[in-house]
Image (cartoon, helix red, strand yellow):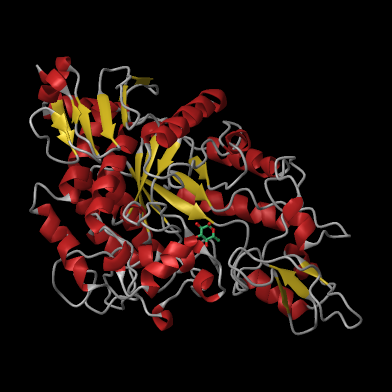
Amino acid sequence: MTDATLTESRDEAKTAEWWRQAAVYQIYPRSFADANGDGLGDIPGILSRVDYLADLGIDAVWLSPFYPSELADGGYDVADYRNVDPRLGTLDDFDAMVEALHARGIHVIVDIVPNHSSDQHAWFQEALAAGRGSEARERYIFRDGKGPDGSEPPTDWVSVFGGPAWQRVEDGQWYFHHFATEQPDFNWNHPDVREDFLKTLRFWSDRGVDGFRIDVAHMLTKDLTEPLPSRAELEAMDSTTGVHPITDRDDVHEVYAEWRKVFNSYDPPRTAVAEAWVATPERRARYASAEGLGQAFNFDLLEADFDAPEFRAIIDENLAQSRLSGSSTTWVLSNHDVTRHATRYGLAPLRGRDVKQGTEWVAAGGPADMLDRDRGLRRAKAATLLLLGLPGSAYLYQGEELGLHEVAEIAPEQRQDPAFFRGAEFDGLGRDGCRVPLPWSADGVSFGFGSAPAHLPQPAWFADHAVDAEAADPASTLSLYREALRLRHPLQTGETLEWVETGRADVLRFVRPNGWQVVTNFGTEPFDLGADAADVVLSSAPLAGSALPGEASVWIAPASLLS
Ligand code: GLC
């Protein structure tokens, strides 16, 4: 295939609709690259790796929060929405990074965290100082406690990270926090809150940001009219009614309709993708509407086993939903909140999301006992090729292109995730294991991440996955991702697929309208590709003659492109 063919298809993606089938690479800034040698990744670090991102062939980057933060929740506790954490750089550094990425044709998406701020945010500090009954407390959710002296929390609700969802302040009032204690929830009925986020969206849009990822988009609006339900009553409530007290309320879409007006006041319109953990695909589609955020994460594959019928059902359901909403769907196998997919797929008995296994896995004295690393990676590569071949946008998480496994070897005192300390499940260990800084070189104090030890410990086996080692190896996971992302541009035209029956329940095969085909063998028995083997342009494992081995995927190019 000539480079001209590839460039042509890539140009087609440079329109206002660029996001529909984009490959978006998630950067967790504190763990990507450290330019100033303080052990924490930063914006100049990202700037120094723009060539790497361009060579990878992605269409956009999504940056997890880089705003000033006390890091009570990895930056998802924002103290100032319109600035850069001084440890990560300056606004000028941010502008330079955006310019360099745009110069390479890479769009920039930033994370907006509207449900809660940090307790260090000026408004929360003002609320604490102003005392009970003050106007300043109205921007958050303050209540008096129960019991004769108000010393019991207003309800027995628990936070997502474990432990009570209410925290008492000095003068005896309580505030609501869905997540960590340091993350007080905003009161979205307050006009200041609504106005301030519009200002934040304009601020970053004016700086050239192309889109936004909206953190827990389903949680913002609440109805906390007394009497409040108990935890048991709350958990028993149907969350699909649109009037649940704290989640997925219909009135949240009034907020996003306002945001849409801001997005559409730019040329091209800014885009948004909702992180919305809601009960049904129908409820999710509301976040993806063109009058709202425009797109919503579909996390179904991330929660699925490596299983052909399960994958097929999920793909069908989400493509049907995107036809209804008019949006395109989003495929995700890994992000900063879940165990890396190479590890999930390598855990026996192969239900990677089983919380107890995560705990036993470490308790058993290390990965070797329970984790089949090779199998996990083999399946991860097969699943990724399938994912990149699907209609819709694909979200990749930093480090998966290196075939990284979850890092289990982090001592409790080195962990940072509040979910670990507050006892929430998240696979038993919290989320630090997928947030360990990237290995750029096979040696050096932090494998090339920076000149100081990294803020989370990197294991010795990171050397085998370092960028410099993998870049030089045509059989590496990195080489597979690069080639897949290059070929993905001509593959991604049209937003449909047709299944081709394979006669095997564990083999999926589909064809795109332009003739590209993807075949994935979820089983362990080889699958014969027959004469099509000659048109295979990409394969997650070497073919044996015309046989696709078990736990592997191939892409077959249309004959017209090959001639
Ligand atoms: C989202 C983020 C997660 C964060 C939480 C609270 O789920 O992805 O990392 O802890 O929101 O902001």
How far across and how far down the image is residue 373, in percent?
25, 58
How far across and how far down the image is residue 12, in percent?
30, 26
Q: Nearer the viewer, residue 279 or 529?
A: 529
Q: Is residue 118 left or right of residue 19?
A: right
- Residue at left offset 75%, top offset 40%: 241
- Residue at left offset 67%, top offset 53%: 220
Q: Nearer the viewer, residue 296 or 410?
A: 410
Work out which quarter of the rendered image holds the N terminus and state it: top left
Q: Is residue 74 visible?
A: no
Is 467 placed above or below 123 here? above
How far across and how far down the image is residue 153, in percent?
79, 74
Q: Quadrant of residue 524?
A: top left
How far across and how far down the image is residue 82, in percent?
52, 61
Q: Nearer the viewer, residue 266 or 470?
A: 470
Work out which quarter of the rendered image holds the C terminus and state it: top left
Q: Is residue 285 left or right of residue 522?
A: right
- Residue at left offset 56%, top offset 39%: 293
